[in-house]
Amino acid sequence: MADLRELYQEVVFDHYKKPRNCHRLSDANHIAEGYNPLCGDKVTVYLKVADNVIADVSFEGLGCAISTASASLMTEALKGKTLDEAEHIFQEFHEMVTCHDHVDHGDMGKLGVLAGVSEFPARVKCATLAWHTLQSAIKNRGKIVTTE
């Protein structure tokens, strides 16, 4: 178990230090901003949606390791997915990081490295900020998403 936890920490740290898809998406047609006032995390999520598919996704922002890693992993998981698939992944991810039952989330792929966040309630907001911002971008809500 300690080896698995260490591997998960390495993946999170790698995505924090070298986040994937961390740039402004110039041809985005869905954009939303998010803010976590508790720790100061800020994120902007950019989507290029074509024919109900997330053709491209990226983010920009400043945040803690969990927030940045979660946004990076999110972009990798959602690129090429339909909006319905993205919604399903969001629901699964949200359940994984908020559920205190040790349910097997083996089908979450790399996103599973964030399952341990559920043990730290204050960090759940860090892990879900990009995801809630994604939801706002998809729905073109236009308001800044906050975790409070």
Image (cartoon, helix red, strand yellow):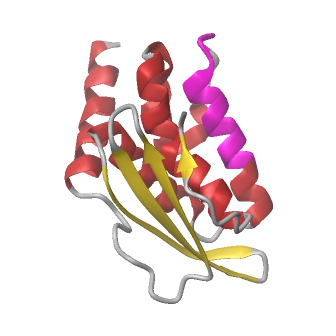
* Quadrant (top left, top right, bottom left, bottom right) of the C terminus: top right
> Where residue 90 sits in the image (x, y, percent)?
66, 45
- State whether residue 72 appears in this view: no
Q: Which residue is drawn at 23% across and 57% down?
A: 18
Q: Residue at x 33, y 34 (%)?
A: 39
User: In the picture, residue 135 is in which quadrant?
Assistant: bottom right
From this view, report whether residue 97 is shown above or below residue 87: above
Please give the name of the residue rendered at 42% of the width and 56% of the height, measured from the top-left corner: 43
The image shows residue 57 at horizontal and vertical percentages of 52, 71
Main secondary structure along the magenta-highlighted residues: helix
Front residue of 20/48: it is: 48
Magenta includes 71?
no
Q: Is residue 50 above or below residue 63?
A: below
| Nearer to me, 8 or 143 | 143
Residue 14: x percent and y percent? 24, 47
In the rendered image, the residue lying farthest to the left is 17
Q: Is residue 127 visible?
A: yes
Quadrant location of the N terminus?
A: top left
The percent position of residue 32, horizontal first and vertical second, equals: 56, 65
- Total number of numbered discs in the rendering: 0
Q: In this view, does 35 lie to the left or right of 143?
A: left
Q: 103 and 146: which one is in front?
A: 146
Q: Is residue 13 left or right of residue 76?
A: left
Where 92 falls versus 100 (above or below)? below
Q: What stretch is highlighted in magenta?
A: 88-102
Residue 89 among magenta residues: yes
Q: In this rendering, is residue 7 above or below 20?
A: above
Residue 96 occupies quadrant = top right
